[in-house]
Amino acid sequence: MIATQPQLPLLGTMAGFRRFSVPEYHRLTEIGVLTEDDNLELIEGYLVLKMARNPPHDCSIQLVSGACNAATPAGWCVRIQCAITLPDSEPEPDITVARGTARNYAAHHPSPSEIGTLVEVADSTLLGDRADKARIYARANIPIYWIVNLIDRQIEVHEQPSGPTTAPAYAKTTTYRLGDAIPFVLDGTVVATFAVQDLLP
């Protein structure tokens, strides 16, 4: 998650902070400069601390991932807080629905063409998930991006990504509130519908 307040990258040069490419980020991991214990993700070239999680956040991840797992058809898999590889970022969305099975990703993280839906659960990170993550995912042409908004108790579904334009964004946003049914869409097909209240803690 990206915090609502700006964060400086954690690695830089004497002249100031620098951006890292995705291959550089991978190399830092391979040679042991970065480890799983560093709790970082690459966001638009910068190394950013991931936010701490609270019980409602984790509960919602379990509720959404459980619903998606039960409804996901053959040929797709549900990944929880696992990395994805984008052109300038390697975030770790709360939930990724990706093509294939877990074994398809034994040697690489899912790329945009392999992703059907991404989900971020947001409370303190809401502004960053709406602005930063939406921009990053729209630039990468992720077709559907959900924000499970714990503050307002609603789910915001972003569709129709712009791709790598000067101002990447999603053209369509639909807000689903308590009492609504939210469609779970993969490859343009509704594979299930979920009650919003069933996905919130």
Image: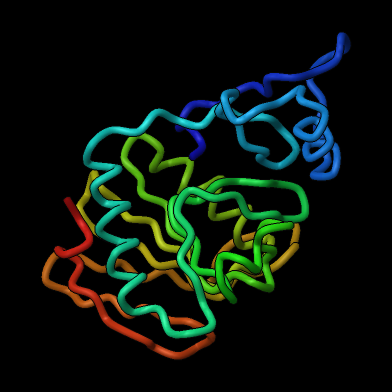
Residue 19 can be seen, yes or no: yes
**Against 108, is 103 above or below?**
below
* Residue 160 in which image quadrant: bottom right
Residue 182 x, y percent position in the rendering = 28, 75
Name the residue rendered at 67%, 57% in the picture. Answer: 109
* Residue sitting nearer the eye, 1 or 28: 28
**Against 33, is 113 above or below?**
below
Residue 47 x, y percent position in the rendering = 68, 30
* Residue 63 in which image quadrant: bottom left
**Against 177, is 190 above or below?**
below
* Residue sitting nearer the eye, 41 or 127: 41
Name the residue rendered at 59%, 70% in the picture. Answer: 115
Residue 167 can be seen, yes or no: no
Q: In the orientation shown, which residue stands out farthest toward the left?
A: 179
Name the residue rendered at 40%, 78% in the picture. Answer: 72
Residue 123 x, y percent position in the rendering = 31, 40
**Against 120, is 194 above or below?**
below
Q: In the orientation shown, which residue stands out farthest toward the bottom?
A: 189
* Residue sitting nearer the eye, 21 or 75: 75
